[in-house]
């Protein structure tokens, strides 16, 4: 059967272009953004453009600066590990190799968590992530580059994999991070300052983006960015974006995969994440597994083979030979309000999540590009 996937508009901007364009603005080669003396990039994890516009009354400052053109498409899968790597290397997953939240190490039956599994599963941040970080390139060229983030992230494998080359400035709360970022931009001409704000995403996973708790967190983020805008020098450009949006999936919409379920026939390993499964199957079984999953799930999910996903360009125009076997043999990307869980696992903690992401829907893939300061000219 033919595979019909959502297509990005020809003029759509990709998250992979954001940091190169910020560097161009600092080099007085403006394209997406006007030239600026220094630049601050604020990454609000989990703030999709659809989420923001639906709750604009709780983010009046950000919404007032969100023009129609201020959007980008995140990468596939629309998950933090892949998206942040793409943002900070300027490459798609087919090049950098972080192909999802959990992906199999070729030749093994392990699928490490690619946000937190670097130390526990022995992933080498200098080898497993294959692309040179843009911060490393910029710092080598003499540019001041700073990462402002939570202290516990300073020495992680993921930080080293995608942020090496930058000076790490720890700050516990979002308000502290914004103050540190403004100071760094003011005192280091030509600086690129990256601020990571994970709190909204954390609340969204636990309570859902439609919850009162998420609205409260959004209001705090909005107020903090307004104060950042007020305290940063006028010649500093500020850009607010995200890695993905969020979809709420209540427990009654979970699809639980259990022992004896024919959807698990010939499946050796289930990885990925609840809205974008990566199924690693027995040799020669991909066609049979795809047929079973399409028969059951095609009304609410895109089901495709690895070859179909690669041919469609979901992992970018180039997929390196080394990266190809990391991708699941069969992919299941939710388009309805569903999430898939391997219920055979003893740990059910993941099933308590409400906010989800990872798939191809606009809600998950379209993120804001809000221009402030010198970028708002």
Image (cartoon, rainbow, N blue to C red):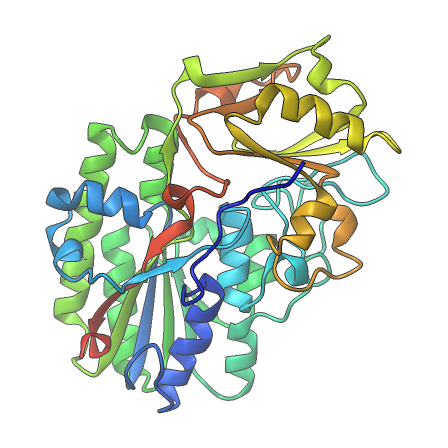
220 and 353: which is toward the camera: 353
Left or right of residue 56, residue 8 in this image: right
29 versus 155 height, above or below = below
Position of residue 52 measured from the top left corner of the image (x, y, whole percent): 24, 46
Which image quarter is the N terminus in? top right
What residue is drawn where x is 29% and y is 34%? Answer: 209
Quadrant for residue 216, please give it: top left
Quarter where residue 277 is shown:
top right
Q: Residue at x 72, y 13 (%)?
A: 262
Percent of width and height locating residue 213? 23, 31
Residue farthest along the bottom direction in this orientation: 28
Give the percent coordinates (x, y) of residue 329: 75, 38
Give the total number of marks visible in the rendering: 0
Front-lying residue, 147 or 318: 318
Q: In this orientation, does residue 350 appear?
A: yes
Which image quarter holds the C terminus?
Answer: bottom left
Residue most toward the right? 283
Left or right of 159 in this view: 226? left
Q: Position of residue 46 (x, y in %)?
A: 37, 45
Residue 116 sits in which quadrant?
top right
Residue lying at the far front of the rendered structure: 1
């Amino acid at each position: 059967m033919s595979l019909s996937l959502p297509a990005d508009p020809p003029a759509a901007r990709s998250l992979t272009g954001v940091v190169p364009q910020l560097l161009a603005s600092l080099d007085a080669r403006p394209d997406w953004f006007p030239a600026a003396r220094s630049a601050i990039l604020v990454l609000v994890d989990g703030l999709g453009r659809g989420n923001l516009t639906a709750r604009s009354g709780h983010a009046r400052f950000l919404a007032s600066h969100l023009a129609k053109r201020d959007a980008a498409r995140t990468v596939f899968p629309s998950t933090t590990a892949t998206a942040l790597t793409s943002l900070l290397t300027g490459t798609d997953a087919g090049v950098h190799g972080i192909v999802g939240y959990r992906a199999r190490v070729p030749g093994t039956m392990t699928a490490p968590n690619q946000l937190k599994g670097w130390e526990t599963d022995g992933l080498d941040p200098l080898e497993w992530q294959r692309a040179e970080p843009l911060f490393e390139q910029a710092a080598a060229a003499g540019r001041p580059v700073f990462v402002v983030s939570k202290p516990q992230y300073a020495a992680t494998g993921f930080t080293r994999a995608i942020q090496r080359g930058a000076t790490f400035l720890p700050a516990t709360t979002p308000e502290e991070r914004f103050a540190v970022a403004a100071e760094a931009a003011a005192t280091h001409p030509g600086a690129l300052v990256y601020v990571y704000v994970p709190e909204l995403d954390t609340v969204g996973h636990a309570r859902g983006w439609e919850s009162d708790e998420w609205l409260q967190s959004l209001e705090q983020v909005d107020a903090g960015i307004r104060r950042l805008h007020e305290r940063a020098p006028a010649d500093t450009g500020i850009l607010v974006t995200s890695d993905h949006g969020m979809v709420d999936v209540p427990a009654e919409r979970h699809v639980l995969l259990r022992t004896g379920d024919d959807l698990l026939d010939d499946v050796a390993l289930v990885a990925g994440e609840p809205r974008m499964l990566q199924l690693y199957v027995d040799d020669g079984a991909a066609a049979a597994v795809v047929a079973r999953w399409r028969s059951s799930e095609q009304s609410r999910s895109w089901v495709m083979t690895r070859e179909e996903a690669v041919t469609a360009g979901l992992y970018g125009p180039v997929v390196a030979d080394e990266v190809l076997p990391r991708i699941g043999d069969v992919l299941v990307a939710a388009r309805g309000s569903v999430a898939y869980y391997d219920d055979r696992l003893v740990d059910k903690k993941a099933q308590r999540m409400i906010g989800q992401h990872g798939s191809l829907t606009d809600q998950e893939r379209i993120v804001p590009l809000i221009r402030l300061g010198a970028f708002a000219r």
